[in-house]
Image: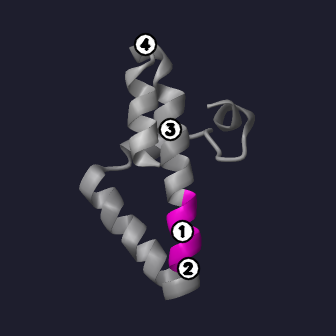
Amino acid sequence: YVEATLEDMSAKAPQDRRPTICCAYARMTEKSRELGEAKCGKGAVDSFHKVVEMAVSSLPNVLCSGFYPEGDTCKAV
């Protein structure tokens, strides 16, 4: 999925890349949460996401708020 996102981004103008990036981020976050909770439990997943947020800051969450995997924008990407 990451490779497809990168290929899609390279074909778009810079101003059109945010939906692609944010929808990919939202999908990966959703899937990692689903798989992680099923295998390790909600507490482990919450801790993992906190560590990731400490490493990359909350910038992806701020820039990508409002992008939902099942939303119209992400379905169009």
Q: CA distance from mark 3 to mark 1?
A: 16 Å
Name the mark nearer the viewer: 4 or 2. Answer: 4
Q: Is residue 2 left or right of residue 19?
A: left
SS label for mark 1: helix
Instruction: Determine if the magenta segment contains residue 33.
Output: yes
SS label for mark 2: helix
Kindly identify which residue carries mark 2. Answer: 37
Instruction: Determine if the magenta segment contains residue 40.
Output: no
Looking at the image, which residue is at 54% across and 68% down?
Answer: 33
How far across and how far down the image is residue 27, in percent? 56, 51
Please rate how many residues cluster around mark 3, counting C-alpha atoms within 10 Å: few if below 14, some from 14 to 19, many from 20.
many
* Residue 60 image label: none
Q: CA distance from mark 2 to mark 1?
A: 6 Å
Kindly identify which residue carries mark 3. Answer: 22
Name the mark nearer the viewer: 4 or 3. Answer: 4
Placement of the C terminus among the 4 image quadrants: top right
How far across and how far down the image is residue 10, in percent? 37, 23
At label 2, the amino acid type is Glu
How far across and how far down the image is residue 41, in percent? 53, 85
Please rate how many residues cluster around mark 2, counting C-alpha atoms within 10 Å: few if below 14, some from 14 to 19, many from 20.
some
Kindly identify which residue carries mark 1. Answer: 33
Q: CA distance from mark 4 to mark 3?
A: 15 Å
Dot 3 or dot 1: first in sequence order is 3
